[in-house]
Amino acid sequence: MKTPYGHLTYCSNIHPGEQWENHFQTLRDNLPYIKSKLSPNEPFALGLRLANDASIELSEPEKLAEFKEWLTANGIYVFTMNGFPYGGFHATRVKDDVHTPDWTTNDRTEYTKRLFRILAQLLPDNMEGGVSTSPLSYRYWWQTEEEKQQAIKTATENILNVVEELIALRQVTGKLMHLDIEPEPDGILENGQEFIEWYADYFLPKGIAHLQESHDLTPEEAKETLLTHIQLCYDVCHFAVSYEEPQVIVDQLKELGIRVGKIQISSAVKMTLNDQRAEKLDAIRSFDEPVYLHQVVAKTNEGTFQKFPDLAEAIQADSSTHNEWRIHFHVPLFIDSYGLLDSTQAEIVKTLNVHKATPFTQHLEVETYTWGVLPTDMQKPIGESIVREMQWVNEQLK
């Protein structure tokens, strides 16, 4: 839905359904209620997540026409898609497989291009569209620095393949769309600083040379094309886990001309360890579940950082020198504390205040997807939970 600071939606990765008919049914079951509570008289936005299988099925003209007809009949529009999880995302072990297949593969490339072809047909006229995606690969899959650098090279070449697709789609449809790369803890690009360094020092030089050769563009034209079609997905949870300041990152991006395609509005778990250490460590155990990765970044008493690839490793480690943990666990936005534990809700408020002062994107997406694995006392009916999340964000945007 339209707000003074951009289009606000929620991501449908909250709903199960790796096959299109299953996912479409969950949308039909939930979206009319959600829209009636949030935007009864105005169009309502949906951030669409399609698994690979669902994207293949929805590419069939009759199924896409049926979906478009349903969207129109219900006053719903799609402007952004989540192309990070490729396969199963519910009722299965996800962990580091959320990166599979990564950007070193043709499967990831073709899946992403397929999403853009679908989005080009769903996107309303006079709106830009975006697809968020993984941060190239999972860093612990690469054993040496040489292997990691080769992965970055291959991933970058495949992303340039997607740029070619976006150029062609814009020429044919007139729709401007961008790939929004989402830094995540333990990704090859795990934070804003690493994304900026990759973009400015590696991607732009390689991409400019590529477009000069393939499209006979000037260096300036090639750079503008890349800045248009490859942008940042600013996931507030991920940036909070990395202890990054939104104003600092936004200023760096602006100085370099790098754009933000989407803010994913999400909250992490935060635990201070300056008191009741044993009780808090016991409380955090209820968040150690087997489906998703819950990377932990611990801040030490000396101001340095220690990283753990999952919550279980952090719990087992010696935390005597730690004074704060931030845990990658997408918890409800509207709750700032959970008994002895806290959330990074303040980082959402801070980020949205930076955005309100100088808007830096037109796409805002709520992305709390862990409802099904939250501790039992936090689980509520999904429709009510989404409405409450969206209402909370709307209050922050006033």
Image: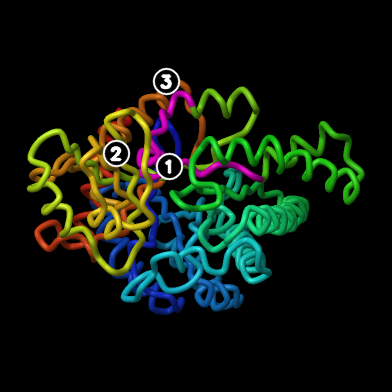
Find out whether residue 323 is within the magenta segment: no
Q: Mark 1 is on which residue type? A: Leu
Reading the image, the residue beneath label 2 is: 393
| Residue sticking out furthest to the top | 357
Left or right for 154, reference 112: right
Left or right for 330, reference 72: left
Q: Is residue 136 placed above or below 192 in the rendered structure? A: below
Sooner in the amino-acid sequence: mark 1 or mark 2: 1
| Along the viewing direction, whichever of 206 and 214 lies nearer the viewer | 206
| Label 1–label 2 contact, CB within 8 A | yes
Over which residues does the magenta segment extend? 230-248
* Quadrant (top left/top right/bottom left/bottom right) for the N terminus: top left
Q: Secondary structure at mark 1?
A: strand
Q: Mark 2 is on which residue type? A: Val
| Residue at 42% across, 42% down | 364
Reading the image, the residue beneath label 1 is: 364
Reading the image, the residue beneath label 3 is: 357
- Report the disc number at residue 385: none
| Residue at 55% across, 51% down | 188
Q: Mark 3 is on which residue type? A: Ala
Position of residue 388 measured from the top left corner of the image (x, y, whole percent): 21, 48
